[in-house]
Image: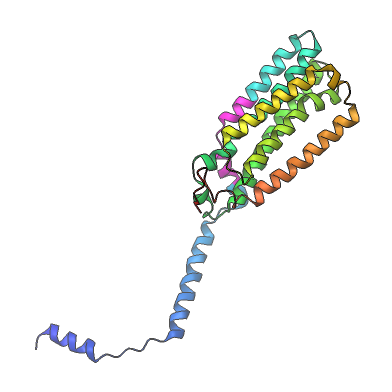
């Protein structure tokens, strides 16, 4: 009898009964070992923010900075404050529109499904991106408003009405369309923002309408817009896992 036949008979004579309890114990220890190794590689929240900062395309911040710098440089040379007021609304709208491509890139690049499987959730990715944009944009807007008040001699109430109010409404449109269940893309969002810009331009150029709106009404409208913006951002962060389930053609991609 050769060695192969001996091995074959040996295998046939062996009757191994698996112990289910030992199998479960082996699986449990394997999982614990895997999780322990992965835990050592896990990013901290600060490292995660730093990573997201690197992923954000800086071109949009540079364009926003260039827009505000150009406005702060040229507006003092406009002798008539009416032209300054009309330009501020357009600047506020364009400043926010420049954010749209960065927030829509998840949808436009079809990467939301991949991000939903990452260690940090899609909600945390959006929260980090909004947080980083908020810090940088708030700094740029604050610096622009301080410069504007000194160079053009505009009152704080005029800056709030003419620049911040149209900017906040534009942000409401951006985040409102982003978190909407309707099948809209970034082009639709930009068109709606430009449409709002046209409405704002009509209001500030129509003295009959403009003089009827008193300062308390403006502040009330501004407060309402801020509350709506907070709600839209909240919905974007906490419902972002829902609005990537269907693409623009209506096909389910989840």
Q: What range of the chain is rendered magenta?
A: 49-64
Location of residue 80 by image quarter: top right
Does residue 99 show up?
A: no
Q: Position of residue 161 (x, y in %)?
A: 81, 26
Does residue 13 show up?
A: yes
Front residue (pair 159, 166): 166
Query: Magenta includes 224?
Result: no
Image quadrant occupied by the N terminus: bottom left
Q: Position of residue 150 (x, y in %)?
A: 81, 18
Front residue (pair 206, 106): 206
- Name the residue furthest left: 1
Front residue (pair 9, 83): 83
201 relative position to 104: left or right: right
Location of residue 223 by image quarter: top right
Q: Position of residue 83 (x, y in %)?
A: 76, 13
Q: Position of residue 52 (x, y in %)?
A: 57, 43
Q: Residue at x 46, y 80 (%)?
A: 24
Location of residue 183 by image quarter: top right
Check the image and report above or below for 104 versus 31: above
Classified by dominant secondary structure, the portion drawn in magenta counts as helix
Check the image and report above or below for 167 versus 79: below
Query: Magenta includes 58?
Result: yes
Q: Residue at x 74, y 40 (%)?
A: 229
Front residue (pair 140, 114): 114
122 relative position to 172: left or right: left
Check the image and report above or below for 74 versus 110: above
Q: Residue at x 47, y 80 (%)?
A: 25
């Amino acid at each position: 009898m050769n060695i192969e036949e001996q091995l074959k008979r040996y295998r046939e004579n062996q009757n191994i009964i698996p112990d289910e309890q030992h199998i479960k114990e082996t699986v449990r220890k394997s999982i614990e070992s895997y999780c322990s190794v992965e835990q050592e590689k896990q990013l901290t929240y600060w490292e995660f923010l730093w990573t997201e900062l690197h992923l954000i395309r800086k071109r949009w911040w540079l364009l926003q900075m260039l827009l505000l710098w150009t406005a702060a440089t040229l507006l003092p040379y406009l002798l008539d404050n009416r032209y300054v007021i009309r330009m501020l609304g357009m600047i506020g709208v364009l400043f926010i529109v420049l954010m749209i491509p960065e927030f829509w890139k998840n949808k436009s690049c079809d990467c939301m499904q991949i991000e939903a499987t990452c260690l940090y959730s899609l909600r945390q990715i959006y929260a980090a991106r909004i947080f980083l944009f908020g810090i940088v944009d708030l700094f740029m807007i604050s610096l622009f408003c301080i410069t504007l008040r000194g160079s053009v001699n505009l009152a704080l109430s005029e800056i709030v009405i003419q620049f911040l109010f149209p900017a906040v409404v534009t942000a409401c449109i951006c985040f409102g369309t982003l978190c909407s269940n309707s099948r809209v893309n970034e082009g639709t969002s930009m068109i709606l923002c430009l449409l709002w810009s046209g409405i704002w331009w009509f209001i500030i150029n129509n003295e009959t309408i403009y003089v009827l709106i008193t300062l308390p009404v403006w502040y009330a409208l501004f407060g309402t817009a801020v509350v709506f913006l907070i709600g839209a951002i909240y919905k974007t962060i906490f419902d972002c896992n829902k609005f990537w389930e269907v693409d623009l053609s209506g096909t389910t991609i989840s």
